[in-house]
Image (tube, helix red, strand yellow):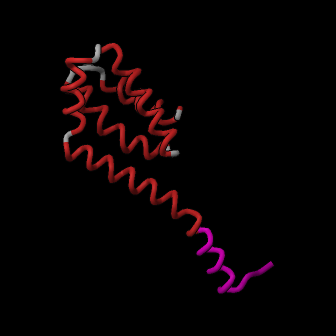
Amino acid sequence: RTANLNQLMQVFMKGAGNLLPIAMILLLALTLGDVAKLVGTGPYLAGIASSSVPQILLAPLVFLVAGFIAFSVGSSWGTFAIMIPIAIPIATTLDLSVPLLLAAAISGGIFG
């Protein structure tokens, strides 16, 4: 079966329209991650966590927060964009294992 150019353009526009909400979620999540990085959310949360949260609970806490964000947003990639810029500065500031907190953020994003 063949299609003319008009039919192809209609199918293309319908498909692009279906992808628009997904693209917007990812764009807004990436923007939120960049804003969190620029504002210094990671070091700020590390300062709070250093005095109030035992270090042994930080990886499970990052996992749970990432899972909640992924469930709320509905996008694991969006969760990565939000949580990774927060988890890495927490790990470096508190001298924790960066791969552990990175894995907790990624695993929580996939879990949610």
Could you say where residue 71 lies in the image, as x and y percent from the top left?
Answer: 52, 39
Query: Within the magenta stretch, is there residue 21?
Result: no
Q: Which of 83 and 52 is in front in this view?
A: 52
Query: Within the magenta stretch, is there residue 10?
Result: yes
The answer to which quarter of the image holds residue 10 is bottom right
The answer to which quarter of the image holds residue 93 is top left
* Residue ranking furthest to the right: 1
Q: In this view, does 6 lie to the left or right of 95?
A: right
Q: Secondary structure of the magenta portion, mostly?
A: helix
Question: How many numbered discs, if any?
Answer: 0
Which residue sits at x=24%, y=44%? 37
Q: Is residue 48 left or right of residue 32?
A: left
Could you say where residue 104 lies in the image, as x and y percent from the top left?
Answer: 41, 27
Which residue sits at x=77%, y=81%? 2
Could you say where residue 76 lies in the image, as x and y percent from the top left?
Answer: 49, 42
Image quarter of the N terminus: bottom right
Look at the image and give the residue range highlighted in magenta: 1-15
Which residue sits at x=62%, y=80%? 9
Tell me: residue 17, above or below residue 71.
below
Q: Is residue 2 left or right of residue 70?
A: right
Tell me: residue 61, above or below residue 73.
above
Could you say where residue 112 lies in the image, as x and y percent from the top left?
Answer: 52, 35
